[in-house]
Amino acid sequence: MFGLEVVDRAGPILDIGAGDSPFGRERLDVVRVDPAYADEPPAGSRAVAALGQALPFGDRTFSVVLGSFVAQHVRDVDELLAELLRVLRPEGLLALHPVWRPSAGRRAVNELDGYACLLPSADIRASWYGDLRLPPRRTRWRTLPSLVLCRPPHGSPGELGRIAETIALSRALVPPAVIAVPARWGMRALVHARGTTRLTLPGNRDSPP
């Protein structure tokens, strides 16, 4: 349900890597994008089959861009972020979830001169209407936080590229671990493991890998 927090901000809104997210059904000014739509088009309109790194939209089209569990599937995160910032209007907002490495996200945010903030997902709507502020330094995240970027009002391509590169180099949007477990206790590991990008199930002790 990531994205419902911004339902009272004027559109149009781009939901990148939307998949079967219900957000696009909540209002008429949401455009859903996912490469999987080429094989399985979703019901309804305003759905586009495309990659986030090559969007078929003009510059400064959207007031909000949402991306939930998207960056971890992309090899070149800076290329993805630069493209999302390109289609974002000046002073528009890019909200990405989750930040897998909050400490790395905080360091990146500190380098971006007030154009970014790390927030619990439930607090995203509050950030739309005021300054982007960091939570206290010793914040303990109950859930993985979200990253909110505000496009500079006169952002040049070079400045947008710097923002994208800063976030990408921090690796805040990259899951920190990959684990491999036997199938016989794989579900237990899946429940307890955090920050995993995939779960490899090579088989149980009695079967070949």
Image (cartoon, rainbow, N blue to C red):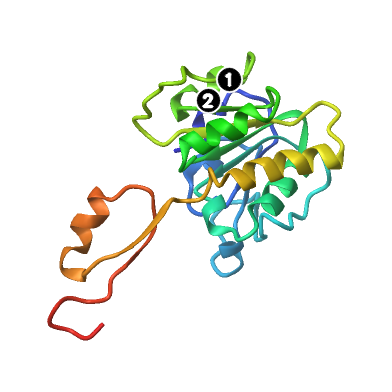
Residue at x 72%, y 38% (from the top left corner): 163
Q: Residues within 10 Å of mark 1 (few under 14, many from 20)?
A: some
Between 26 and 103, the one lying in front of the other is 103
Between 118 and 11, the one lying in front of the other is 118
Which residue position is annotated with label 2?
124
Q: Vertical placement of 106 versus 84: above or below?
A: above
Q: Residue extending furthest bottom?
A: 208
Q: List x then y, in percent, for residue 19.
A: 51, 54
Where residue 153 sits, quadrant-wise, is top right
Residue at x 72%, y 30% (from the top left corner): 92
> Which quadrant of the rendered structure holds the C terminus?
bottom left
Judge from the rendering whether residue 191 lies leftward or rightward of residue 11; answer left or right: left
Q: Report whether residue 87 is seen.
A: no
- Disc 1 + disc 2, Cβ < 8 Å: yes
Tag of residue 66: none
Q: Vertical placement of 191 versus 90: above or below?
A: below
Residue at x 21%, y 59% (from the top left corner): 187
Q: CA distance from mark 1 to mark 2?
A: 5 Å
Judge from the rendering whether residue 163 lies leftward or rightward of residue 195; answer left or right: right
Amino acid type shown at disc 2: Ile
Q: Secondary structure at mark 2?
A: helix
Which residue position is annotated with label 1?
127
Q: Residue extending furthest top?
A: 130
Q: List x then y, in percent, for residue 147.
A: 56, 34
Between 20 and 105, the one lying in front of the other is 105
Q: Vertical placement of 101 versus 83: above or below?
A: above
Total marks shown come to: 2
Q: Secondary structure at mark 1?
A: helix
Q: List x then y, in percent, for residue 86.
A: 78, 43
Residue at x 70%, y 45% (from the top left corner): 165
Amino acid type shown at disc 1: Ser
Q: Residues within 10 Å of mark 2 (few under 14, many from 20)?
A: many
